[in-house]
Image (cartoon, grey):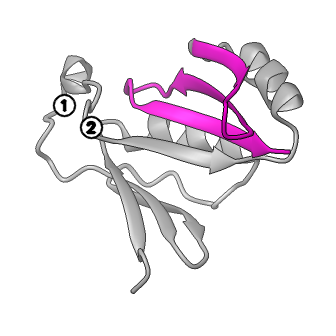
Amino acid sequence: MKIGEVCLITNDVVSLANFYKTLFGIENGSNDEIHQTLLAEETQFTIYNDGSKGNDSSQNTRNPNITLAFTVADLDSEYERLLAMGVKIIEKPTKRPWGAVNMSFYDPDGNVIYFRSFA
């Protein structure tokens, strides 16, 4: 079994998708306000408005039950890039006892995102 898709539900697909396009350094050629697929590899990464959050941006609230983690080659340069983007950093790059170096930050909807690298 493989994970086929990870989908973030939001009421502002364009804004959240644009954040992740910048974060991933990609362009998907879409400004659709309902659904955008950003990564279509083994596991799709999509942003979707299913109507459950209405049109009020205050209804975009952090989901305390899920975080996303991405493995990156150079965590220090990613950290500097995120600072330049104005991203709200939760934790600066920190070495973990198991050998990984992690950092965490919020996306525009308040979801917690981790970047990590391994020695």
Residue linked to disc 2: 11
Q: Earlier in the sequence, mark 1 or mark 2?
A: 2
Measuring from the top left, give residue 110's x and y in whole percent: 38, 23
Image side of residue 96 versus residue 117, left or right: left
Measuring from the top left, give residue 49's x and y in whole percent: 26, 49
Q: Which residues are magenta?
A: 90-119
Of residues 28 and 93, the one nearer the viewer is: 93
From this view, report whether residue 10 is shown above or below residue 55.
Answer: below
Q: Reply yes or no: does residue 111 show up in magenta.
A: yes
Image side of residue 14 versus residue 109, left or right: right
Measuring from the top left, give residue 14's x and y in whole percent: 46, 41
What quarter of the picture does the C terminus occupy?
A: top right
x 67%, y 31%: residue: 97
Measuring from the top left, give residue 101's x and y in whole percent: 73, 33
Of residues 46 and 93, the one nearer the viewer is: 93
Of residues 16 and 24, the one nearer the viewer is: 24
Identify residue type, mark 2.
Answer: Asn
User: Where, by quadrant of the figure, is residue 46 drawn?
Assistant: bottom left
x 40%, y 61%: residue: 6
Image side of residue 88 versus residue 83, left or right: left
From this view, report whether residue 101 is shown above or below residue 110.
Answer: below
x 63%, y 61%: residue: 28
Identify residue type, mark 1.
Answer: Asn
CB atoms of marks 1 and 2 within 8 Å: yes
Image side of residue 36 versus residue 22, left or right: left
C-alpha distance separating marks 1 and 2? 6 Å
Residue furthest to the front:
97
Of residues 36 and 104, the one nearer the viewer is: 104
What quarter of the picture does the N terminus occupy?
A: bottom left
Q: Reply yes or no: does residue 20 show up in magenta.
A: no
x 60%, y 15%: residue: 91
Residue 55: numbered disc? 1
